[in-house]
Image: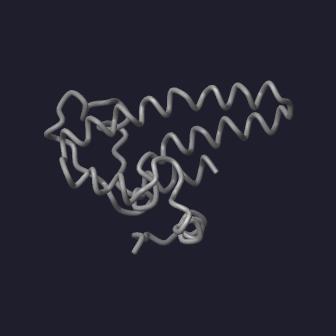
Amino acid sequence: MRFLFEWHLRNSGFDEIGHGLGIYMLFPEEGVQIKSDIYSFIRHPMYAGDFCLALGFAFLKNNLFAFLIASIAFIPFVIAIKCEDKELIKRFGEKHKHYIKETGAITPHLKHIGKFLKFLFSKEKNVRK
């Protein structure tokens, strides 16, 4: 699953230098808001992929302690999501507030699960309608 999230991130315009190294936090005017492809279903696909990776390792280890650690690893993601959304609301205003209401943070809204899975396992570039 992590690989699929990563692949769709790259196809949607995720910039490794700008986003990955935090350049847009230092120079917010250089950043652009991406709402297409995987970002039309979930706002933070990188955290979703990382959580899938942690759960995958827990399944490999196959014990309760591993699942507990994977769950604990989720806490920093929630904190980062809240901080990032506050920053993006400052940067993009009402447009981002609307985006938050329409799009799940790390999982798509239930009504979009089918479309999301179809998108995730296909090679098509797609925007949720």
Q: Please indicate whether residue 101 sits to the left or right of residue 116 in the image.
A: left
Choose top left, top right, bottom left or bottom right for residue 74.
top right
Q: Please indicate whether residue 12 sits to the left or right of residue 25 in the image.
A: right
Q: Position of residue 92 (x, y in %)?
A: 19, 47
Is the C terminus in the top left, top right, bottom left or bottom right quadrant?
A: bottom left
Residue at image location 54% in from the left, 71% down from the top:
115
Residue at image location 42% in from the left, 58% down from the top:
11
Q: How many marks?
A: 0
Choose top left, top right, bottom left or bottom right for residue 58.
top right
Residue sitting at the far right: 62
Q: Position of residue 67 (x, y in %)?
A: 75, 32
Q: Position of residue 15 (x, y in %)?
A: 33, 44
Whether residue 51 is situated above or below residue 10 in the rendered picture: above
Whether residue 68 is situated above or below residue 118 in the rendered picture: above
Residue at image location 41% in from the left, 63% down from the top:
37
Q: Please indicate whether residue 116 sits to the left or right of residue 102 in the image.
A: right
Q: Please indicate whether residue 128 sits to the left or right of residue 114 in the image.
A: left
